[in-house]
């Protein structure tokens, strides 16, 4: 906040008191000026222009305490009125008492009844702002929580869908494996043995005998049946 006023008048004290109460540690830039007499208008114009060049100024208070019409006459100056009208930031006038109206009041963005009132108009109470921030934080937290819960439900649904899909795929694979197992079982040598056939192994290496030419008299063989085995000795071979 920028303030243009006399650095020794009552107005600055009232403004600073209210600002400190409503928003402690607020950054304030005071641009001093004479607010009464023939040179006052030029002084105020120069003070305003100094504030225009200060980065971060968001609002300007132009203030003066009460006085006679003659004391306040500088605020009826045309050059000052034009300067106030072209202010690049909002400007609050607080000149004299509520019954005192000057041209500066008419061209300002807002007219305050008193310097103290100007401070009240310029700054909201910090506790109110903090309360609004806390409420916004709470709303944001609720909104985020709702989003998280929504996405969590989506994830749960996707997980359920994936489990269902995997179950179907597993059942299909199991069915395929069952069919293959059935085919393998049908081709199993054990099935052949179950029908009364046997398998002969030449000892001692247990090589499967496929042809009688693999054997000669005196060889020992192991015959496997569907149930059990028998060790035998070759007496003779033939085609």
Image (spheres, rainbow, N blue to C red):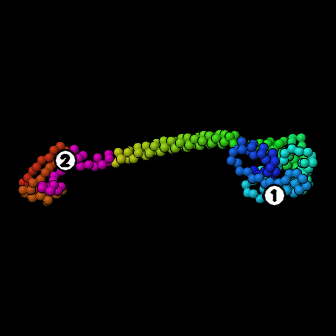
Q: How far is disc 1 from disc 2 in space, using C-alphas?
A: 117 Å
Q: Nearer the viewer, residue 66 or 112?
A: 66
**Place of residue 175 in the rendered image (x, y in percent of width and height, measured from the top left):** 38, 44
Q: Is residue 233 magenta?
A: no
Q: Is residue 103 visible?
A: no
Per the rendering, the mark at residue 221 is none
Q: Nearer the viewer, residue 150 or 51?
A: 51
Which quarter of the figure has residue 217? bottom left
Q: Which residues are magenta?
A: 181-209
Q: Is residue 201 left or right of residue 44?
A: left
Q: Residue at x 90, y 48 (%)?
A: 71
**Place of residue 10 in the rendered image (x, y in percent of width and height, measured from the top left):** 81, 45
**Residue at mark 2:** 197
- Asked which secondary structure carries label 2, the reply is loop
Q: Residue at x 73, y 54 (%)?
A: 56
Q: Nearer the viewer, residue 229 or 82?
A: 82
**Residue at mark 1:** 49
Quarter of the rendering occupied by the C terminus: bottom left
- Asked which secondary structure carries label 1, the reply is helix
Q: Residue furthest front?
A: 8
* N-terminal label among 1 and 2: 1
Q: Is residue 189 visible?
A: yes
Around disc 2, counting alpha carbons within 10 Å, would you say few (fewer than 14), some (14 to 19), or many (20 or more)? Answer: few
The correct choice, above or below, for 239 with respect to 72 in the image is below
Q: Is residue 97 left or right of residue 219?
A: right
Q: Is residue 35 left or right of residue 135?
A: right
**Place of residue 177 in the rendered image (x, y in percent of width and height, measured from the top left):** 36, 47
Q: Residue at x 23, y 49 (%)?
A: 189
Q: Nearer the viewer, residue 167 or 108?
A: 108
Around disc 1, counting alpha carbons within 10 Å, would you say few (fewer than 14), some (14 to 19), or many (20 or more)? Answer: some
């Amino acid at each position: 906040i920028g303030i243009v006023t006399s650095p020794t008048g009552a107005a600055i004290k009232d403004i600073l008191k209210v600002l400190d109460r409503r928003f402690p540690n607020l950054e304030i830039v005071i641009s001093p000026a004479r607010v009464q007499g023939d040179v006052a208008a030029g002084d105020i114009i120069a003070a305003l222009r100094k504030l225009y060049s200060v980065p971060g100024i968001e609002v300007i208070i132009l203030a003066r305490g009460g006085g006679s019409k003659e004391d306040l006459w500088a605020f009826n100056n045309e050059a000052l009125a034009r300067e106030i009208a072209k202010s690049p930031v909002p400007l609050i006038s607080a000149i004299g008492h509520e019954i005192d109206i000057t041209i500066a009041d008419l061209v300002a963005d807002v007219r305050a009844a008193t310097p103290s009132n100007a401070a009240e108009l310029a700054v909201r109470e910090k506790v109110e702002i903090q309360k609004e921030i806390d409420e916004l934080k709470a709303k944001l937290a609720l909104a985020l929580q709702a989003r998280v819960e929504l996405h969590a439900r989506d994830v749960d649904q996707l997980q359920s869908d994936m489990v269902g899909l995997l179950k179907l795929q597993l059942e299909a694979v199991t069915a395929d494996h069952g069919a293959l197992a059935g085919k393998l079982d049908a081709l199993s040598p054990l099935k052949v043995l179950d029908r009364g056939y046997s398998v002969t192994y030449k000892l001692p290496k247990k090589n499967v005998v496929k042809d009688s030419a693999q054997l000669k008299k005196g060889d020992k063989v192991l015959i496997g049946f569907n149930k059990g085995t028998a060790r035998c000795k070759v007496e003779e071979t033939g085609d």
